[in-house]
Amino acid sequence: MVNKTCILDKIKEFYGLKGNKALSEFLGVTKQTISNWYSRNTIDYDIVLAKCKDVDLHWLLLGSNEKPISTLAEDNTDFPKRDGEDKEEEYQIFKSFNGMSSLYNYLINRYNYSNTKKVTDNISGAVDVISLFIADNHIWNNFCKLYYSFEDGQIPKEKLLSEFENFIVKDKKVYSLLSRYEAVLDEISKSILDDEFPDLNYNDFFDENGELRK
């Protein structure tokens, strides 16, 4: 589990904030909210990411001593900026993943999109791996409903596979973009989803030969 009190302390350190009152004013929350975050070891990631746009995310959330991501785009000059249309299209895809747009906006605003292009241009991974990192519980539930319709003979196999591929393409993009932040994904997900992820996996739907179970 990520230590949220350390994150709060780092925000104070980075911005030179003296005490919880100054921190609460900076984040736009009450002093009681800050006290609750400390006592319960919790934070609101949307608020933190929206307010701390000029802080290195590795250092703030992960305590990493690695080279800051903000320098990576400079090292990858072969990857030009995305044009506005591509950027907007991917942003709209990402917005469908409930509540994580703050993290996506942070990446775009801080890293000039060059590095995220490098990540998303190298989308890979098997469906059974990607499915473990689905960012929106409702999308997985929607596929489950389709699968049950297939089981009942209400839709053909081709329709199910087509819809499944549509879901997975979205999940691959999100997973590829956020994989470097895997250590905090679970924390973010718990803070924005009403329910835990369903206890389902790839093998519930496909046999050892990759064929749909029926």
Image (tube, grey):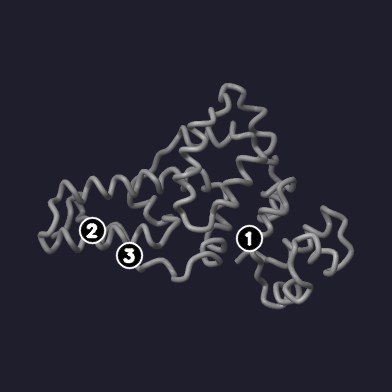
Residue position for label 2 = 146
Residue position for label 3 = 200
Residue position for label 1 = 45
Q: Which residue is drawn at 67% across and 49% down?
A: 58
* Residue 72 in the figure: left or right of residue 186: right
| Identity, as a three-letter code, of the amino acid under mark 1 | Tyr
Q: Residue at x 16, y 58 (%)?
A: 150
**Residue 58 - label:** none
* Residue 165 in the figure: left or right of residue 101: left
Q: What is the distance, in whole Å, between disc 3 and disc 2 at their CAs?
A: 14 Å
| Above/below status of 202 relative to 120 | below
Dot 1 lies on which element? Answer: helix
Q: Quadrant of the C terminus?
A: bottom left
* Residue 143 in the figure: left or right of residue 153: right
| Above/below status of 90 relative to 36 | above
Residue 38 occupies quadrant: bottom right
Q: What is the distance, in whole Å, between disc 1 and disc 3 at their CAs?
A: 27 Å
